[in-house]
Structure formats: C-alpha cells, structure tokens
C-alpha cells in the first residue's frame, strides 16, 4: 500500500476519513473539511443517535450530492487527553481494516487535534500513517487461487494535514521502521524449504545496500573459534550453519562503544533426536524469529539513519535428526571453553545463543547485549501471547526495555534469575546441562544458562516464543501470522536512550 501526504482537500474519488472528537466535536481540520462539503459532517452528527466520536467508533456516510467522492468515514478519536501515539497507530490500522472490508481502493485521511492533546497534529498524522503501514502487511506470495473478496483492496492512502510537509518529515523515520518490521515478517513467514541458513545469509548481505557492514562466519571459521555448541545443533542437517554479523556505524563518534543485539535463528526445529510431536511441528519454521527481529531491526536503524553504533549477530542453523545428529548425553565445548551436557536436543536455542553471545561480548565489547529467541514453550504457559518474557542481569537495562515496550506496544514482563535456579542446570559430568529439573521454571533455567555466557556485560534475554506468531488477529497493527515482534521495541530502546 502506497502512503502519500498532502494538504487538506476533498478527494475526487475513494473514501474520505475524518477524525471526530468525543461528543461529536469537530477538530480544526474536520471543520475545514465540513465547510468544503457544505456542512455534511455537522448534519450527519446531528442526525446520528449512536455515533458520538467515542474512541474507535466509526460511521459510514454516503458522499454529499455533487461530489465524485464515494463515501465519508467518520472515526472516533475520543477525548483529546486520551489521544496518544499507540492510539493513533491503532487508528491507522483500523482505517485499513475498515476500508478493505468496504472494498475501497483509495482513501484520504484527515486528522487534527484540539487543545488538551499531548500530540501535535503532525505527530498524530505520522503515527496514523505508521499504524496503517503496519496493518497493511500481507504475505500472499504462495496464494494462487484467492477469491476477490479475500484480497485486500486498499492500495493508496493519502494522509492529509494542515502541516503536510512537517507530517511527512515526522512520518519518514517511522515508515523506515515499518520497512524493518516487514522484512522480519517476511523472513518469519517463509517456509523452511525457502528460507534456511544459506538463503537468509543472502538476505542479510543485501543490507549492505543501506549501509550495513556484513560479515559471515562459516562452519570452518566457527570450528577454528571453538563454537562447538552451535555446530553441534546443526550437525544433523545437510544445510550448513552460519553466524552473521551486521554493523551499523551511525554514532557521531566512530569509536563509540556499540550496543548489541543477538538473535536465535533456528530455521527449522524438529527437536533433533529428542523429536517433537508431529502436531504443530510446521510452526517451527518461525523458530528463527529472534534472528528475524535482529535482521529487521538493523534494516530499520539503517533506514532511519540512527545515530548509534549497533551490532547485530544471528546464529543460523537447522535442527534435524539424521544419523549424524547430536544425541542426548553428548557433551559440547563452547567457544568460552565451558562444557554443556546435552540432555535434550530440543533445547537447542540456548546452545546457539551461548556461542553467539560469547563471540559478541568478546569481539565487540558492547555497552550491553540483548538477545531475542523463541526459546521456551514455558514462557507461553506463563505469559500467554500478550507479553514477552524479560530476564536481565542489569536493572537499568531491564527498566529501559520495559519502558520501551510500553511505549512501542511490544510489552515485556520481567521474570527472576538467581543462584537457586542456576544450580538446577549444574551437570554431574560437565560444567552445565542444557535443561533444568523436569518442567519446573523452564524459561528461567534456560535464561540461567545464557547468563553464564555474558560475564559482566549488561545483558537482557527476551523470550519471544509467545509473540512471534499471532493467531488472534485482535491487534489493529499486527495481522495474523508473523508479528515482527521486537523491531519496534528495540528501535525505541535505541532511539530513547542510546543515540548520540
């Protein structure tokens, strides 16, 4: 869907959408539009017994006589003091949904605020455009027999403002973030016969076009570095494993210490020899959503020219159960020199991250590291599909991540770490084992293993297993399927706290 910006006008075709305040109040922009269409808004509001501008409410009107316009859609803004960025993003998403339901191909959105709103008119417009772009995502690449009524119809949205130049400038970085979200959603949506470690490496290399430096560690190099954990996970697959490093250098000082994001990229997870049940195994194509989020984040940061030095590291591997596969009871030696007894080959993500985290810490000495992983089913039992799990060794980083989550709408809930949990992963024959005691605190013991590979570096682990793939479809800006979770959150973290 194409998004454009313009001054206030009455379009000659399509649908005109106008924001209305609670109580049926007209904003300055709505008043302008009302005058241009001979008071039709005022008349419609006076005649309506149900629409009063309540937040998220809508009213569809036939276009006034004498206009080529198809229809007018009124959308409730609520009270001025209720209006915030997330509401405007949701409004943009709802507009897209309603217009597709109406079968509309093009539309123009007129928004403004009155006294008492915390947002400027250009911020309102920018956030609505951002939400509309997020909501317009579809992954239809493999559909060949869609009915017309199943296809989205909206292909052009013009966002109007009395300050259109300022609104377009405000929207530009947000739309670059949506580019990153789209990339993540594409990577996570693709089937595993199309997106596997080698093909994702090719996608990553394309990021050099937006100014990102890319380096790839192949299996020979990982062997030289002693990365026995990630190599052990991939040894049962005919597809090679890789670690990819992406660097964006946007800080005012070239030598400024970078921030780092690390992603689990298991492109398909059978569970290995500890094989998963067949029911639902097809969903394991998105076991690389942590890596997908890091790749999309790097595109977003480069696209909006973030003033920070950022490193993104992803471990890309396929977990398969052939005759060369890792066995329960095997012991692997990590890059750190620490050894891990593999009790369950389906607890492979922590093995991938152990080497990736150690490499990132030792090579780049970052201000902090945040890893993202669809790591445990236990986190879904604990938190469902509304918040991701947050574990951290640093209170300031945890607090900043939590704040960024609330501001971006990608929320986190902090869970504990501690010595009593840590001892549950001690092994009788190695430094540690890759699972704790039975089903108890499975997300916590997984995080405890990761913490053993970060030394004193401020670090946070985000378990996004419940957030990577949405089945509900109740978020106006997140269609069903791959969510792109993490891109908006971490972009907000960098923007609010780490840009020079």
Image: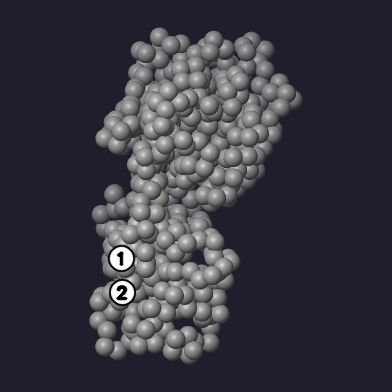
Residue 46 horizontal/vertical position (percent): 49, 89
Residue 68 figure quarter: bottom left
Please state the horizontal and vertical placement of residue 119, each as a whole percent of the image. Answer: 50, 61
- Identified at 60% across, 43% down, the residue is 402
In the image shown, does 31 or 402 lie closer to the viewer? 31
Label 2: state its secondary structure: loop
Residue 187 seen in render: no
Where 95 falls versus 291 (above or below)? below
Query: Horizontally, is 141 left or right of 411 in the view?
Result: left
* Quarter the N terminus occupies: bottom left
Disc 1 is placed on an element classified as strand
| Pointer 1 with pointer 2, Cβ within 8 A | yes
Q: Give x and y (percent) for residue 408.
A: 52, 49
Residue 170 vertical position relative to residue 67 in the rendered view, above or below:
above
Residue visible at 63% across and 39% down?
A: 399
Residue depicted at 40% across the width and 15% down the height: 222
- Tell me how many marks there are: 2
- Name the image colouring: one colour
Q: Position of residue 439 (x, y in %)?
A: 66, 33
Task: Tell me the tag on residue 344.
Answer: none
Q: Is residue 500 above or below residue 145?
A: above
- Position of residue 197 in the picture relative to residue 345 (left or right): left
Residue 248 in sight here: yes
Label 1, on which residue? 6
- Disc 2 target residue: 9
C-alpha separation, residue under disc 1 versus residue under disc 2: 8 Å
**The residue positioned farthest toward the right in the image shown:** 420
């Amino acid at each position: 869907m194409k998004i454009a910006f313009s001054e206030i006008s009455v379009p000659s075709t399509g649908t005109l959408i106008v924001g209305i305040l609670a109580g049926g109040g007209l904003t300055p922009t709505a008043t302008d539009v009302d005058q241009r269409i001979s008071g039709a808004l005022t008349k419609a509001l006076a005649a309506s017994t149900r629409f009063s501008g309540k937040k998220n409410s809508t009213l569809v009107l036939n276009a006034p006589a004498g206009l080529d316009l198809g229809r007018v859609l009124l959308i409730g803004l609520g009270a001025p003091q209720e209006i915030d960025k997330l509401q405007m993003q949701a409004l943009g998403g709802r507009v897209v949904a309603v217009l597709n339901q109406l079968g509309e191909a093009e539309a123009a959105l007129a928004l403004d605020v009155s006294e008492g709103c915390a947002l400027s008119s250009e911020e309102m417009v920018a956030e609505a455009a951002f939400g509309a772009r997020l909501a317009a995502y579809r992954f239809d690449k493999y559909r060949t027999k869609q009915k017309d009524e199943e296809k989205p119809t909206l292909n052009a949205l013009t966002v109007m403002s009395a300050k259109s130049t300022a609104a377009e400038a405000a929207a530009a970085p947000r739309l670059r973030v949506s580019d990153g979200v789209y990339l993540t959603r594409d990577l996570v949506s693709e089937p595993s016969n199309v997106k596997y470690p080698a093909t994702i490496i090719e996608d990553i290399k394309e990021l050099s076009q937006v100014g990102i430096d890319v380096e790839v560690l192949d299996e020979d190099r990982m062997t030289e570095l002693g990365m026995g954990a990630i190599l052990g996970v991939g040894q049962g697959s005919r597809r090679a494993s890789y670690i990819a490093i992406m660097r964006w250098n946007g800080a005012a000082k070239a030598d400024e210490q970078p921030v780092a994001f690390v992603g689990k990229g298991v492109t398909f997870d059978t569970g290995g020899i500890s094989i998963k049940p067949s029911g639902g195994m097809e969903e394991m194509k998105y076991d690389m959503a942590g890596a997908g989020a890091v790749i999309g984040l790097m595109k977003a940061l480069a696209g909006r020219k973030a003033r920070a030095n950022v490193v993104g590291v992803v471990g890309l591997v396929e977990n398969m159960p052939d005759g060369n596969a890792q066995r329960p009871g095997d012991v692997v030696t990590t890059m750190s020199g620490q050894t891990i007894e593999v009790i369950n080959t389906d607890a492979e993500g922590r093995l991938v991250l152990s080497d990736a985290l150690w490499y990132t810490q030792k090579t780049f000495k970052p201000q902090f590291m945040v890893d993202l992983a669809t790591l445990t089913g236990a986190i879904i039992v604990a938190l469902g599909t509304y918040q991701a799990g947050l574990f951290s060794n640093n209170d300031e980083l945890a607090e900043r991540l939590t704040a960024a989550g609330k501001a971006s709408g990608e929320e986190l809930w902090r869970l504990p770490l501690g010595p009593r949990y840590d001892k549950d992963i001690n092994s009788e024959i190695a430094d540690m084992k890759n699972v704790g005691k039975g089903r108890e605190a499975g997300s916590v013991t997984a995080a405890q293993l990761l913490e053993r590979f970060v030394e004193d570096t401020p670090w946070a682990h985000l378990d996004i297993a419940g957030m990577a793939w949405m089945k509900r479809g109740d978020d106006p800006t997140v269609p069903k399927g791959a969510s792109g979770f993490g891109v908006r959150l971490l972009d907000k973290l960098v923007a609010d706290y780490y840009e020079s």
